[in-house]
Image: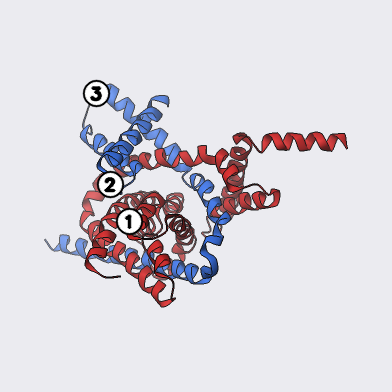
């Protein structure tokens, strides 16, 4: 009985400290990544989705609040900023190829971003969703901090946008490959660009794990579509009465 | 390693400051990305040994960080699962919109870009 009490005390101590949650997050990711590689990079075995499910089930089982978990895991979350800055280097390395394709990049960027915005709007209308939810969904294809900013601007709910944006990333990373295989798109620059444009960082991570060129064009689209969408959506709201 | 981490952090810091100062919707890290890329392009042909070494160092550090890009989405992703109740009764509709719109956007964008690339290559050959 005494032993059990001691173990419980250790747990009480550990769950209040970042170390435990950091170790758990990295451990869960290693499991996800192992399974992803074991499946020969099968897109449905998405390492992000697996690690998220592992960590959340542990939180639910142990009745730990998300706030407590995030307090520890925020050090990993913090690295998202520097990692975004670091994406400048792969883009820099391929700058000649990017310059060569600048025409198609520009057209695909504008039309692709518009397609993402309008298809979301009309599908959501078709589903009879509330206007507040529709506004929260419209910027969902760009990286979460940009999407949340736009959502706030147009009358959406930023926290709802964050959830929808992350789900978009996971859907794109898991099912995008099938869509492109069905359409028989072979051009790696186009495949990568579409991933980054439609499913931001999580799609970019998937593209990077598959093919270097695709990864670089995904990173490029991630940055460019973020900029384009934050200009396009406020502009569209001035022109059209959504 | 430390020097390159310092530079990457510094560019994010500048990016965040620029974003706050001009009140733009583009997040600080993306502005940092643009600034770092511009800096790299500016010193592209430089033969200065210090600049070359620093560039190599930043390059290997960023390859390392971006290699673990997926991991960095786990903490916020767990938040999504824990807060799914925000979607209330609209689960299926919202998921349906996300699913179809995302797949169609990926297909449309990739197909469009591939076709434009093929068209441009043909035109370049004719000239």
**How crowded is the residue under tag 2: few (<14 C-alpha within 10 Å), some, or many (20+)?**
few
Q: Nearer the viewer, residue A104 or B119?
A: A104
Q: Colour of chain B?
A: blue
Instruction: Find out whether the residues at labels 1 and 2 contact each other: C-beta distance under 8 Å.
Output: no
Residue at point 49% right, 48% down?
B73
Q: Is residue A85 left or right of residue B124?
A: right
Q: Label 2 lies in what chain?
A: B
**How crowded is the residue under tag 1: few (<14 C-alpha within 10 Å), some, or many (20+)?**
some
Marking on residue A153: 1
Q: Which residue is mark 3?
A: B48
Dot in front, 3 or 2: 2
Q: Colour of chain A?
A: red
Q: Position of residue B123 (x, y in %)?
A: 16, 63
Q: Is residue B1 above or below residue A235?
A: above
Q: Which residue is mark 2?
A: B24
Q: Label 3 lies in what chain?
A: B
Dot in front, 3 or 1: 1
Q: CA distance from mark 3 to mark 1?
A: 46 Å
Q: Quadrant of the C terminus of chain B?
A: bottom left
Element carrying mark 1:
helix
Q: Residue furthest left?
A: B127
Q: Position of residue A166 (x, y in %)?
A: 47, 56
Q: CA distance from mark 3 to mark 2?
A: 35 Å
The answer, for residue B16, to whether it is visible in the render is yes
Element carrying mark 3:
loop
Marking on residue A50: none
Q: Is residue A209 left or right of residue A61?
A: left
Q: Position of residue A149 (x, y in %)?
A: 36, 52
């Amino acid at each position: 009985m005494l032993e059990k009490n001691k173990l419980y005390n250790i747990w009480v101590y550990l769950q209040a400290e970042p170390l435990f949650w950091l170790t758990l997050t990295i451990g869960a990711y290693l499991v996800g990544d192992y399974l992803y590689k074991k499946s020969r990079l099968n897109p449905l075995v998405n390492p992000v989705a697996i690690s998220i499910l592992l960590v959340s089930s542990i939180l639910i089982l142990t009745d730990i609040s998300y706030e407590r978990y995030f307090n520890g895991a925020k050090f990993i979350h913090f690295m998202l900023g520097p990692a975004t800055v670091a994406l400048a280097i792969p883009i820099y390395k391929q700058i000649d190829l990017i310059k060569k394709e600048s025409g198609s990049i520009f057209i695909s960027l504008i039309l692709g971003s518009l397609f993402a915005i309008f298809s979301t709007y009309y599908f959501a209308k078709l589903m009879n969703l509330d206007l507040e939810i529709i506004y929260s969904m419209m910027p969902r294809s760009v990286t979460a901090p940009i999407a949340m900013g736009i959502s706030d601007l147009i009358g959406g709910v930023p926290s709802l946008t964050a959830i929808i944006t992350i789900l978009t990333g996971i859907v794109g990373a898991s099912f995008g490959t099938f869509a492109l295989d069905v359409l028989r798109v072979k051009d790696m620059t186009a495949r990568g660009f579409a991933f980054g444009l439609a499913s931001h960082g999580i799609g970019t991570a998937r593209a990077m794990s598959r093919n270097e060129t695709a990864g670089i064009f995904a990173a490029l689209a991630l940055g460019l579509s973020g900029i384009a969408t934050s200009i396009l959506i406020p502009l569209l709201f001035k022109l059209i009465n959504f | 390693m430390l020097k390159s981490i310092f530079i990457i952090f510094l560019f994010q810091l500048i990016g965040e400051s620029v974003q706050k100062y001009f009140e733009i919707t583009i997040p600080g890290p993306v502005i940092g990305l643009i600034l770092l890329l511009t800096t790299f392009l500016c010193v592209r042909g430089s033969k200065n040994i210090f600049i070359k070494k620093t560039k190599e160092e930043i390059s290997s550090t960023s390859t390392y960080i971006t290699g673990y890009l997926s991991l960095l989405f786990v903490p916020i992703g767990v938040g999504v699962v824990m807060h799914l109740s925000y979607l209330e009764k609209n689960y299926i509709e919202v998921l349906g919109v996300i699913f179809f719109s995302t797949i169609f956007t990926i297909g449309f964008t990739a197909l469009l870009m591939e076709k434009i690339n093929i068209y441009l290559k043909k035109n370049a050959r004719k000239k």
